Image (spheres, helix red, strand yellow):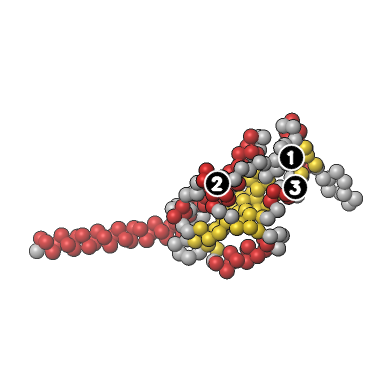
């Protein structure tokens, strides 16, 4: 009788533990907190890593990392990277269905060809751009710390490529659409002080600089 009671207690304990795991998984899947949502993301299989073909000639572009979640969804991280000056200008994440992911990639490819790269290359490029900008006094976008969780488990030191940020060896800034004239001028002064160059386009009916 005692043996039967012990077996029953063990069975109930296993059942309780299973329910606890299921409850944690449900909480993770429904959380808006990326720290919770991307727990164990380093174990999720990488689907692909994409960078614009012209990232080094144009200086800026959106880099995409995608991983398959245990539920079969696609977790994506997008980094708007400026390798000439400002590093990670923007970053966001989404969890979408596989068809939704393909639609997003197709829209990005309308802007220009995207190349698939190795995980180590991708991670090193993102971090090198962020470090370069930081050395000039430009921190990465506030959401970078969250989106970079999708890079967990990837060792950038395994990439043998040498990256040189900046343009012709110095920082180069071209005003983007989301930067005010005042902000652009402040950036330009800092770039100039670092020995770099900048171009500030002034929005006006006739254009101009």
* Residue at 62% across, 66% down: 103
Residue 168 image label: 1
**Disc 1 to disc 3: CB gap under 8 Å:** no
Q: Which residue is mark 2?
A: 159
With 196 as the anchor, is 150 left or right in this view? left
In this view, the residue in front, 150 or 184, is: 150
What is the x, y in percent for residue 189?
A: 76, 33
The Cα atoms of the two marked residues, 1 and 3, are separated by 20 Å
* Residue at 75% across, 49% down: 177
Q: Circle 3 — which element?
A: loop
Earlier residue among tags 1 and 3: 1
The Cα atoms of the two marked residues, 2 and 3, are separated by 30 Å
In this view, the residue in front, 29 or 154, is: 154
Q: Circle 2 — which element?
A: loop
Image-quadrant location for residue 168: top right
Q: Which residue is mark 3?
A: 176
With 44 as the anchor, is 124 left or right in this view? right
């Amino acid at each position: 009788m005692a043996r039967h009671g012990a077996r029953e207690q063990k069975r109930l304990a296993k059942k309780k533990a299973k329910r606890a795991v299921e409850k944690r998984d449900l909480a993770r899947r429904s959380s808006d907190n990326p720290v919770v949502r991307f727990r164990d993301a380093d174990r999720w299989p990488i689907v692909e890593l994409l960078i614009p073909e012209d990232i080094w000639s144009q200086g800026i572009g959106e880099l995409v990392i995608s991983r398959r979640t245990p539920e079969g969804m696609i977790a994506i991280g997008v980094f708007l990277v400026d390798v000439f000056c400002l590093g990670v200008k923007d970053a966001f994440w989404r969890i979408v269905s596989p068809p939704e992911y393909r639609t997003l990639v197709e829209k990005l490819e309308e802007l220009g060809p995207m190349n698939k790269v190795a995980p180590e290359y991708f991670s090193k490029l993102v971090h090198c751009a962020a470090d370069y900008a930081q050395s000039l006094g430009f921190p990465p976008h506030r959401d970078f710390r969250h989106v970079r969780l999708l890079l967990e488990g990837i060792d950038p030191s395994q990439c043998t490529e040498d990256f040189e940020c900046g343009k012709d060896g110095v920082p180069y800034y071209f005003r983007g659409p989301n930067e005010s004239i005042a902000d652009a001028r402040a950036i330009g002064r800092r770039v100039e002080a670092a020995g770099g160059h900048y171009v500030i386009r002034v929005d006006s009916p006739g254009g101009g600089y």
